[in-house]
């Protein structure tokens, strides 16, 4: 069995540091060879590039811009009437992805509009999402970048997120229900799940997208234990 590869999600980890470029350095110092992030568009691209080059860390994944978070947006891919905003956001994501040699972009679907019933708008939102995915696929293929979609569970995490049914894709981990370290108290046995991924010969990165109970560094005992068990 091959050893699994973990990448630090620096939107969730090392949040004691204000800037994403600083978090790249911190992730490398903690032993991560790769990072991923949601929205790092407020950080200077050149500073991110410097951090990436200085550490040798791979940037595995970024998300398309969410839209207006304060207004309740969480992506625009499936939102009727906002196709132009989605395309503008995709261009920005491509700029950062190319600048950081990142080969994966998560194309965020977005939430069911406030006041709407999922069953009523699902067909229209699906049609918009498919249209935007086709547009994105054409642009991404020309740059050698893979577009990913990420179902978000509507039972606990986000009841209104449009894409809520998983089939396959990039793996991210956090304990349930607190979304803390994989070895914190909760419902999931990650030792078993890691063995399952190994047995299925999973070759991709596993994104560490959890909320540390203390500092990020203090909570990394779980990955050290995994590495020790696989020496």
Image (cartoon, helix red, strand yellow):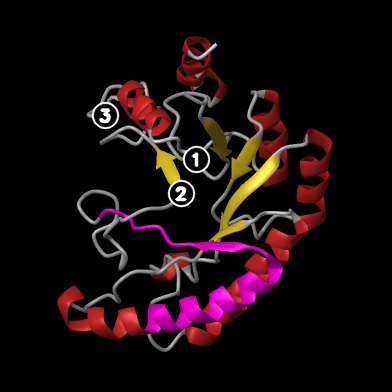
In the image, residue 137 sits, relative to residue 58, either above or below, namely below
In the image, residue 142 sits, relative to residue 9, either above or below, namely below
User: Where residue 26 sits: x, y (%)?
Assistant: 68, 30
For disc 2, the marked residue is: 170
**Label of residue 45 in the image:** none
Describe the element under mark 2 as helix, strand or loop.
loop
In the image, is 96 to the left or to the right of 74? right
Task: Using the rendered image of the protein, determine whether residue 19 is visible from the camera's viewpoint.
Answer: no
Tag count: 3
Q: Are marks 2 and 3 in contact (CB under 8 Å)?
A: no
Comparing 190 with 17, the one in front is 190
Q: Are marks 2 and 1 in contact (CB under 8 Å)?
A: yes
Q: Are marks 1 and 3 in contact (CB under 8 Å)?
A: no
User: Where residue 25 sits: x, y (%)?
Assistant: 73, 33
Comparing 181 with 172, the one in front is 172
x 62%, y 70%: residue: 140
What is the CA distance from the residue labelled 2 to the residue labelled 3?
Answer: 18 Å
What's the magenta region? 128-153
Describe the element under mark 1 as helix, strand or loop.
strand
Q: Earlier in the sequence, mark 2 or mark 1?
A: 2
In the image, is 113 to the left or to the right of 223? left
Describe the element under mark 3 as helix, strand or loop.
loop
x 49%, y 85%: residue: 83
Other-residue count near label 2 (Cα within 10 Å), few / some / many at <14 / 14–19 / ≥20: some
What kind of secondary structure does the magenta stretch mostly adopt?
A: helix
Does the stretch in magenta take in 131? yes
x 54%, y 45%: residue: 11
């Amino acid at each position: 069995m091959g050893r699994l590869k973990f990448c630090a999600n620096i939107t969730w980890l090392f949040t004691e540091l204000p800037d994403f470029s600083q978090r790249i350095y911190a992730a490398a110092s903690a032993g991560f060879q790769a990072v991923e992030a949601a929205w790092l568009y407020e950080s200077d691209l050149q500073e991110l590039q410097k951090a990436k080059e200085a550490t040798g860390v791979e940037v595995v994944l970024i998300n398309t811009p969410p839209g207006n978070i304060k207004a309740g947006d969480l992506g625009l891919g499936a939102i009727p009437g906002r196709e132009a905003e989605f395309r503008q956001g995709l261009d920005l994501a491509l700029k950062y992805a190319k600048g950081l040699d990142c080969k994966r972009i998560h194309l965020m679907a977005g939430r069911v509009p406030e006041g709407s019933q999922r069953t009523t708008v699902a067909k229209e939102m699906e049609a918009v999402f498919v249209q935007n995915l086709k547009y994105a696929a054409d642009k991404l293929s020309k740059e050698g970048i893979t577009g990913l979609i990420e179902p978000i569970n509507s039972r606990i995490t986000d009841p209104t997120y449009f894409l809520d049914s998983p089939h396959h894709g990039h793996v991210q981990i956090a304990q349930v229900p607190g979304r803390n370290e994989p070895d914190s108290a909760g419902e999931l046995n990650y030792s078993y799940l890691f063995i399952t991924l190994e047995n299925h010969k999973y070759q991709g990165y596993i994104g560490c997208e959890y909320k540390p109970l203390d500092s990020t560094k203090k909570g990394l005992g779980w990955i050290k234990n995994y590495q020790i068990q696989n020496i």
